[in-house]
Amino acid sequence: MQLTFTDLLEKLPPDSVEFVGDNQFKLNLTQITGEELGFDSSVVEPITKLLDALVKLTQSINDEKLMNDEDSIKFASKDIVGTPEKPMYEYIVRVDVNPNSFLENLVDPTAT
């Protein structure tokens, strides 16, 4: 398993990502949240649900790697932090970089 859009689609609601041609994808945040959204809508829920899908994809890859006795990857994770009175989710997305080219050459953790 890899970090691909095909695999991410399995973690998102149907029709939430569409290939529209010319190397372009359309991310439908209304489908992801199940709510009608506009430019004045909050970005918190749609982005959080997208991050949740990345966490699920990471967990799926690591489950498969565990079954094959391979090292897990570190890509997307989610933890509950804060206090019982004020709990918060903390998302972390880690991406290795080639130190010679940095953001022009991000390394997919499943490719190593």
Image (tube, grey):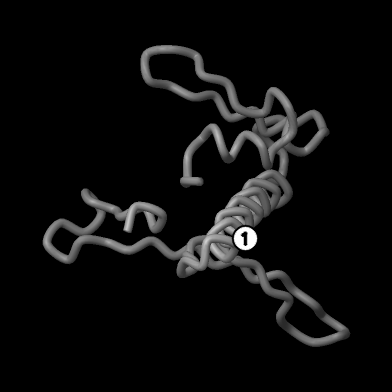
Q: What is the x, y in percent for residue 61?
A: 56, 55
Residue drawn at 66 percent across, 54 percent down: 56
- Judging depth in this view, the residue of 96 and 34 nearest the camera is 96
Residue 74 place in picture, x, y as percent: 48, 67
Q: Position of residue 59 (x, y in %)?
A: 62, 59
Query: Which residue is situated farthest in the front direction here?
Result: 68
In the displayed structure, 22 sits above or below 26; it is: above
Look at label 1 and name its amino acid.
Answer: Asp
Q: Residue at x 59, y 66 (%)?
A: 77
Q: Residue at x 70, y 48 (%)?
A: 49
Quarter of the image where one finds residue 46: top right
Q: Is residue 53 above or below residue 18?
A: below
Q: Nearer the viewer, residue 54 or 24?
A: 54
Residue located 47% across and 65% down the image: 73
Pointer 1: what residue? 63
Q: Is residue 12 left or right of residue 17?
A: right
Quarter of the image that includes the C terminus: bottom left
Which element is circle 1 on? helix
Pick out the residue farthest to the left.
Answer: 100
Residue 12, located in which quarter of the rendered image?
A: top right
Using residue 81 as the reference point, say whether residue 62 is left or right of it. left
Question: Few, some or many C-alpha atoms within 10 Å of disc 1 (few <14, some 14-19, many ≥20)?
Answer: some
Q: Is residue 45 left or right of residue 92?
A: right
* Outermost right residue: 85
Above/below status of 88 relative to 111: below
